[in-house]
């Protein structure tokens, strides 16, 4: 069976066009948007919770959550103070630009400064589908192991920031930080990294400063600077 | 964009036919086969390592590893004593029956009793593709969180055993075992569960007994009993 068939190429190219349209729509509203990806259970929702709580009063945050079957994550973000919207992917393993377009139509972009998109928990498929956000952020986590950059290179290559969550578990896991960081560096030289723990709060400040800086820089210019 | 298009239906039905052929081939050789699925980093390879080491001398074990980009996992299984074979999926997010068929052609089935297939680390896509193995085994892990059955129901529904790995991290994670088990029970009533730690060795015995029992029961009969 061929790996690539014409219909797949065509779907990806249509996705890219729609992602551009999404970005234009987001920027026209003066909003900065990030796409958060990770394995199941790495801590995407915990990071979003902590981010929304910490930036409350400084930034108005909207959150679009892609989930296969529940609204548990959107509920948590809403409880933390975000304008949260649930996209049920109906079993699909990733968000795509069509799903984001439909979600954007239901969200009041004029009421937010920062849009956080939480992708489906998956280290493979989401990497292949641009959404139209300004930054891709990967949440890695200590218990997943230090070999993940080597085993999921597509994901590690395509992001502009790596959050390394659950550092409170470092004493209890066989995780070699040097091996892990060497893998990241080989795939994505110089990518900004934030070792932190959503549970203990350690390291969160650096992440929050970076994120708020990205939003402020982007929205204070005439045009937005886009890495991808 | 429609969720289901005819070409997808056709691919799935072709996959099912090939899975049946794989199973016939595996059974003709008197081999029992399991398909291990999990999130990235839940501990599939660690479980396989421990299993191969513990059953060495009792069962001859073959291992087929589906990985996107490396042979790290197959190397670990081989070092533990298995006849290991690497399938590089070339970026694909799951194994399918075609990949298993091609791998089986390269493996000496006459030289093994138990075939362990390690799927790609992914809680979504592998659930949709039968391979032709006798049992599907899910490796969950404590740091992933207790909400996973609720968020990835397709995976939890389609397995005949759930290994709950990394119980040594229970004191350091906010994991409610009762909530987790309630989710499993709702989706897959009565499914056999093995809380254990590949790191400390706690709980491994029950898993090994079950697995060896499955192999012996199946291979001592005229025909093999197949759950799925």
Image: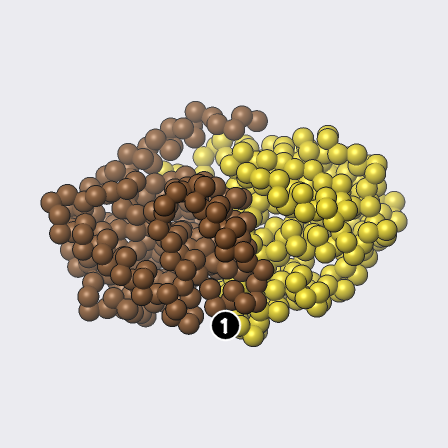
Chain colours: A brown, B yellow
Q: Position of residue A169 (x, y in %)?
A: 51, 66
Q: For mark 1, name the chain.
A: B
* Left or right: A210 as drawn, with respect to B82: left
| Residue A182 visible (yes or no) | yes
- SS class, disc 1: loop
- Specify whether residue B128 is in view: no
Q: Position of residue B180 (x, y in %)?
A: 55, 68
How many marks the image carries: the answer is 1
Residue at the location (77% across, 38% down)?
A: B26
Q: Residue furthest front?
A: A178
On the rendered image, what quadrant is the C terminus of chain A found in?
top left
Q: Quadrant of residue A226?
A: top left
> In the figure, residue A129 lies in which quadrant?
top left
Give the position of the N terminus of chain A as an image quadrant.
Answer: top right
The residue positioned 64% from the left and 60% from the top of the image is B162
Q: Nearer the viewer, residue A39 or B79?
A: B79
Locate residue B81, reporting x and y percent: 77, 46
Give the residue displayed 36% in from the left and 45% down from the top.
Answer: A190
Where B166 sits versus B112, above or below? below
* A23 over B107 or under it: above or below: below
Classify mark 1: residues with Cα within 10 Å, few (<14), some (14-19) or many (20+).
Answer: some
**Disc 1 marks which residue?**
B174
In the image, is residue B172 above or below residue A74?
below
Instruction: Give coordinates of residue A156: x percent, y percent.
Output: 43, 45
């Amino acid at each position: 069976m061929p790996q690539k068939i014409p219909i797949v190429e065509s779907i990806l190219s249509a996705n890219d066009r729609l992602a551009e349209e999404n970005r234009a729509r987001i920027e026209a509203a003066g909003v900065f948007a990030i796409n958060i990806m990770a394995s199941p259970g790495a801590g995407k929702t915990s990071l979003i919770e902590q981010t929304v709580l910490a930036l409350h009063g400084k930034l108005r945050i909207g959150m679009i959550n892609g989930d296969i079957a529940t609204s548990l994550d959107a509920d948590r973000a809403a409880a933390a103070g975000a304008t949260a919207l649930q996209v049920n992917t109906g079993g699909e393993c990733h968000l795509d630009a069509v799903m984001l377009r439909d979600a954007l139509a239901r969200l009041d972009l004029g009421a937010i400064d920062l849009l956080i998109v939480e992708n489906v928990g998956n280290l493979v498929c989401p990497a292949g589908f641009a959404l139209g956000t300004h930054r891709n952020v990967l949440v890695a986590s200590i218990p997943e192991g230090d070999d993940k950059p080597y085993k999921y290179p597509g994901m590690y290559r395509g992001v502009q920031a790596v959050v390394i969550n659950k550092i409170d578990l470092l004493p209890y896991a066989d995780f070699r930080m040097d091996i892990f960081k060497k893998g990241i560096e080989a795939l994505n030289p110089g990518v900004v990294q934030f070792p932190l723990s959503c549970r203990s709060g350690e390291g969160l400040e650096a992440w929050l400063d970076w994120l708020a800086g990205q939003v402020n820089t982007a929205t204070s210019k005439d045009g937005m600077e886009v890495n991808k």
